[in-house]
Amino acid sequence: MSKLTAIYDRSRVPLYLQVASVMRQRIQKGYWKEGQKISTLEELEAEFSVARVTIRQAVEILRDEGLLESLQGRGTFVSNRPKNSRSFDLITDFDSVLDSLQSNVVKRVEVKEHRPAPLLAPDEGTPAEDYTLLRSVQYNEGAPFSVVNLFLDTQIFERDPEQFKRVAALPVIMDMDDIVIAHAYQTLTIGVSDPETADLLKIGLGEPTVDCHLVLIDDKGTAIYNANIHYIKDCVRFRTDLLGNTGPRRGGRSKKSK
Amino acid sequence: MSKLTAIYDRSRVPLYLQVASVMRQRIQKGYWKEGQKISTLEELEAEFSVARVTIRQAVEILRDEGLLESLQGRGTFVSNRPKNSRSFDLITDFDSVLDSLQSNVVKRVEVKEHRPAPLLAPDEGTPAEDYTLLRSVQYNEGAPFSVVNLFLDTQIFERDPEQFKRVAALPVIMDMDDIVIAHAYQTLTIGVSDPETADLLKIGLGEPTVDCHLVLIDDKGTAIYNANIHYIKDCVRFRTDLLGNTGPRRGGRSKKSK
DNA sequence: CTCAATTTGTTCGTATGTATG
DNA sequence: ACATACATACGAACAAATTGA
């Protein structure tokens, strides 16, 4: 019990799940390679300071997930399994957003009118008078990877309700030639799934998600498009070149660094 | 038990923790505002389909965290607590990286030589011959918010070992005038804390983190700087304007969208 | 072939945690 | 607050399969 209480100080999640999470990551990040024999139960026992049975429970979870295989008398091995990396890069420019809507399956699951929209940050424009909620789920290879809760300016929604109810909203908006998007702010944070999101994404309640707050502001400063998008955490990645278009950087610049 | 097994299909984390996570997010994201009376236990009971005691356990956790206050006969209220938003924006350009190293406290916790470095993606240059591991922790307001595992090309490390052991590496590198950084790739993903990271960040084992893989490539194509940075998930946020420097966007562009 | 060492698999007893009604 | 059922975790012992000496 001495061990237990010490570890439980920081997380009340069952120990075998904590251990399983760490081992799962070691496999996914390639620290434990495919086909490789991993540490023995006794070594893992020592490393994590837990009982034998607890390690076995963790291994059992990863076995069920097809990540590990155990052979009595020989050891535990990382499975050679077909790679199905469903992860993709998050989007950082407007045209890619439009493109991605074309390449993924979008299923509208709900439309509600007169809904209070998510709060806007000080620089995210002024709220529209009324919003219509369009909720949809994005699928990739048949599995859901994101839930979109879009609060669309009702004035715009009513210009083509049938279209908005059927397909992705952004292309429809961009087809309206009197609309000018002055700003498109995207804010990414880490959140946890609420009951609706967990249900639609087929994940556990309270599991971490990547939350994207996307706000489009028109030329009058109105936030006509105000969306919260929840991505399954393993499905997203974000890459950037810090040098951007400034070109290579030469050392010795600190003399004038005030 | 009927309820229980249904929910446990997707997550084996104790129910009261799942419920607590969702309620914590409602407070943190401002859906439940400060001072507001939240739903009654009975309503929450119905919403989450769990027993009364389970809701009470969740509330107790948030009470311990100072997020909620219960008053017998009146209800449960969101605490008016001092805002200490320790979150900050992730960095997307090179100069900001340099700046941020100056404004945060960095504590070097470990130096190890001849360590195998993290794997490089195909376009992340060729590995250096040998790397030296510099591990440090970044603090903000006295609390740790990130662990940096930097694998530095040993050839560069040995040009000024004492300096590298004491202060942040990047400014030291940028003071060497014969070094040219041709690329600086940053990749963000969601991971979970391993035992060392959990220990240094004072978080639970297996809790989600924002992982940043940062690779600097010199003019010869060598990955001289290869770092894995683990941020506490609540401490980071990432903002961007999708329109960037392309200016406002006018509708009606789809005619030529092949 | 046998033996010993290694490694996973199984079981028991006990204490505490979780969830229902 | 109580009674009940099941889950989690420990420690220890023993069984079964594999390997190499």
Image (cartoon, coloured by chain):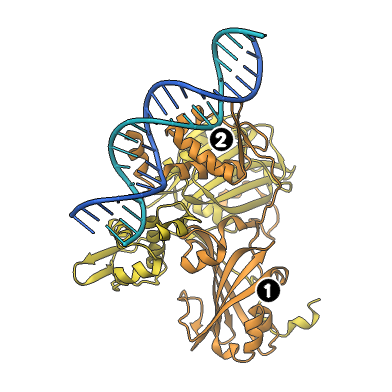
Chain colours: A orange, B yellow, C cyan, D blue
Task: Tell whether A117 sits left or right of B115.
Answer: left
Residue at 39% across / 47% down in the picture? A11
Task: Tell whether A81 sits left or right of B46.
Answer: right
Image location of residue A209, percent across then percent down: 52, 60
The residue to which callout 2 is attached is B133
Residue B87: image quadrant is: bottom left
The amino acid pointed to by label 1 is Thr
Q: CA distance from mark 1 to mark 2?
A: 41 Å
Q: Share a chain, discs 1 and 2?
A: yes
Q: Earlier in the sequence, mark 1 or mark 2?
A: 2
Give me the chain letter of mark 2.
Answer: B
Image location of residue B172, percent across then percent down: 56, 42
Rate crowding at label 1 as few (under 14), some (14 to 19) or many (20 or more) other CA atoms within 10 Å. few
The local secondary structure at tag 2 comes to strand
Compared to residue B74, the image places residue B143 above or below, namely above
Who is closer to the viewer here, B57 or B181?
B57
Image location of residue A111, percent across then percent down: 55, 82
Can the viewer see residue B231? Answer: yes
Give me the chain letter of mark 1.
Answer: B
Can the viewer see residue A25? Answer: no
The residue to which callout 1 is attached is B246
Task: Count the labels in the image.
Answer: 2
Who is closer to the viewer here, A209 or B45?
B45
Who is closer to the viewer here, A154 or A137?
A137
The amino acid pointed to by label 2 is Leu
Q: Nearer the viewer, mark 1 or mark 2?
A: 2
Compared to residue A8, the image places residue A129 above or below, namely below
Q: Quadrant of the N terminus of chain B?
A: bottom left
Residue A89: image quadrant is: bottom right
Image location of residue B39, percent across then percent down: 32, 72
